[in-house]
Amino acid sequence: MKKRPLFTIFLVVFFDLLSFGIVIPILPYYSKTFGANAFQLGWLMAAYSIAQFLCSPLWGSLSDRVGRRPVLLVTILLGASSMVATALAPTYLFLLAARFVAGAFAANISTANAYIADITSEENRAKGMGVIGAGFGLGFIFGPAIGGLLAVNGNYSLPILCAAGLGFLNFLFAFAVLEEPPRNKSPATRSRWAGLQEALGKFRTGMPIGLFFLHTLAFTQLEVAFGLFVLSRFGYGPRGAGGFLAGMGVISAILQGGLIGRLAKKFGEVGLIPAAFFFLMIGMAAAAFAATPTLFALALLPVAVGMGIANPSLSSLVSKGAAATKRGTVMGIYQSAGSLARIVGPPVAGFLFDGIGPRAPLLCSSLLVACGLVISVISGRRLR
């Protein structure tokens, strides 16, 4: 495995997710300035995910044909532009449209996953996929902290403009140093339906994609309700919410940036996935009933561990099961499964929060990952 391209794509992903991390904890408070309730916030997040769902296979398939580098460059540049539109939104509907466009270009994670699969051996695949997770983790360490510090006196546009600036800098960096990885180009263009059949029809790719859907659906419940939960339970604003998310990011980054490769070699991705779902299950249930901020922070520890293990393990399994010439397409469908979960999840989380109470989305999360735990144990033998 070449270290230079792996480190380069890590930096590209990190800056991409740093921008994302700045915006996410601010969005619930920013949306309130437009009079949005929890249900409307859910749709605000769902719009982003609908666009990701539609565009992840598109970018992945396109990168199989024209290359990973040009797709990453175009999506990074236009994604930064969509951040500017988000910051300058005059109405809720404009903000909704801006988040949809941002989601379309944030769907480039499927291309980044395919890039890593191109430059890693199967033995080191989980370690390589941990790079994406480490980028997520570090993005959630620094992003929410930056967003919370900049969002003073209700000025939520400033941190979002800062995120846009980071996006433009990321484009310049990627343009200067990102190289096209060696790979076998797709021999022919096939329909989306054919790619979907190929990805879901094989058990070794279809099952991890299904588990990723459940996993993302569960985490989305926590993600959407997070800012509203800490506000209603502990009176915390953006800075407090950002601190919690940053703490989770530290744990996740340590796991995905350094430990996941060793764990995968010792236990295998198939052995790690049930453990990840178990940690997520107990952590989300404990967080729902945490009586103090300290207990809430402790409950988030197993959630961070579960996230740090699940993401690279599932993406590694999918990439190993995909044909080399179709990795971009299959990874795009894999990311679309997560995006579909983020379409369904936010409105459900908002409905549960408004209709039942602040704990309901977190308890729903725990139940979903419990189902994932059972499925991963039952299907484990066929995935080995």
Image (tube, rainbow, N blue to C red):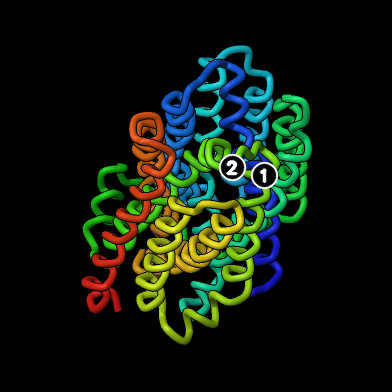
115 to the left or right of 368: right
Q: Which mark is residue 306?
A: none
Circle 1/circle 2 CB separation < 8 Å: yes
Residue at label 1?
Answer: 240
- The C terminus: image quadrant: bottom left
Residue at label 2?
Answer: 234
| Residue lying at the far front of the rendered structure | 291
- The N terminus: image quadrant: bottom right
At label 1, the amino acid type is Gly
226 to the left or right of 43: right
Residue 189 on image: x %, y %: 36, 46
State the image quarter where residue 158 is shown: top right
- Judging depth in this view, the residue of 68 and 122 nearest the camera is 122
230 to the left or right of 242: left
Q: Residues within 10 Å of mark 2 (few under 14, many from 20)?
A: some
Residue drawn 48% across the image and 33% down it: 45
State the image quarter where residue 368 is shown: bottom left
Residue drawn 52% across the image and 47% down it: 66
Residue drawn 27% across the image and 62% down it: 207
At label 2, the amino acid type is Phe
Q: Residues within 10 Å of mark 1 (few under 14, many from 20)?
A: many
- The answer to whether residue 357 is above or below residue 65 is above
Residue 73 on image: x %, y %: 64, 43
